[in-house]
Image: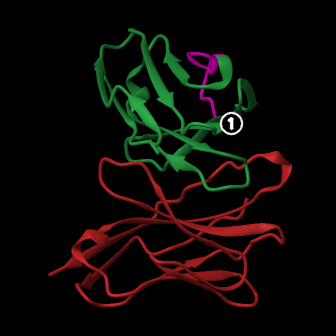
Amino acid sequence: LAKTTQPISMDSYEGQEVNITCSHNNIATNDYITWYQQFPSQGPRFIIQGYKTKVTNEVASLFIPADRKSSTLSLPRVSLSDTAVYYCLVGGFSGGYNKLIFGAGTRLAVHP
Amino acid sequence: EAGVTQFPSHSVIEKGQTVTLRCDPISGHDNLYWYRRVMGKEIKFLLHFVKESKQDESGMPNNRFLAERTGGTYSTLKVQPAELEDSGVYFCASSQVPQETQYFGPGTRLLVL
């Protein structure tokens, strides 16, 4: 499965847009890109998933360039409650199973 | 609809003792996964059940760990005997089908003294 690289930490302020970029140079053709969010003392929570171009839901947007070697999670107008660790995962869903491989994640701190 | 639940939320035991963790997946989810994060490390996959069958147990660290899912509903993860390096947070997740989103429980925090 493709290895991912993302910033260890980021800081932002309330109301700002936050973009977290993840590199996955060895992404395979059948790999999807998935982002999870984790608050302290909780399990990871699915945010968004995409394969190419742009995906948007009520929480975030995911931008994936044509070569798919990177992706950017965009959080519009963050609030204090968005302080969390964000994980970028890349993997395929072939073989009948889905084994998530987590990296270190990006620790986002949102300040007042 | 209830999410994935795990019991206990915390467990403190002494080295050499046995601990059993329980996971109740979302109702109707045939796929159940165990993960863990030991101190300072990343979240690691342990194993995957499809109903009551072990689909992939490649992440199980050693034979001190035994996972079961009798009847294809809840699952237990037993550590016997526990060692200091087993301390960490054990997460359970479930999904309806393997290709779909995995929903995680809050985790069980295990401390082995």
Q: Is residue B78 magenta?
A: no
Residues in magenta, as a range: B58-70
Give the amino acid type for the residue marked by disc 1 in the picture: Asp
Q: Chain of mark 1?
A: B
Locate residue A47, reporting x and y percent: 50, 67
Q: Is residue A81 left or right of residue B50?
A: left
The residue tagged 1 is B30
Q: Nearer the viewer, residue A53 or B36?
A: A53
The residue positioned 45% from the left and 54% from the top of the image is: A44
Q: Is residue A111 left or right of residue A99?
A: left
Q: Residues within 10 Å of mark 1 (few under 14, many from 20)?
A: some
- Relative to A59, does residue A102 appear above or below in the rendering? above
Q: Quadrant of the C terminus of chain A?
A: bottom left
Q: Is residue B59 left or right of residue B92?
A: right
Locate residue B23, reporting x and y percent: 49, 29
The residue positioned 42% from the left and 19% from the top of the image is: B83
Q: Residue furthest front?
A: B1
Locate residue B32, reporting x and y percent: 62, 36
Q: Secondary structure at mark 1?
A: loop
Q: Is residue A59 left or right of residue B55?
A: left
Q: Main secondary structure of the magenta part?
A: loop
Among the chains, which one is green?
B
Q: Nearer the viewer, residue A24 or A55?
A: A55
Among the chains, which one is red?
A
Locate residue B5, reporting x and y percent: 43, 35
Q: How many marks?
A: 1
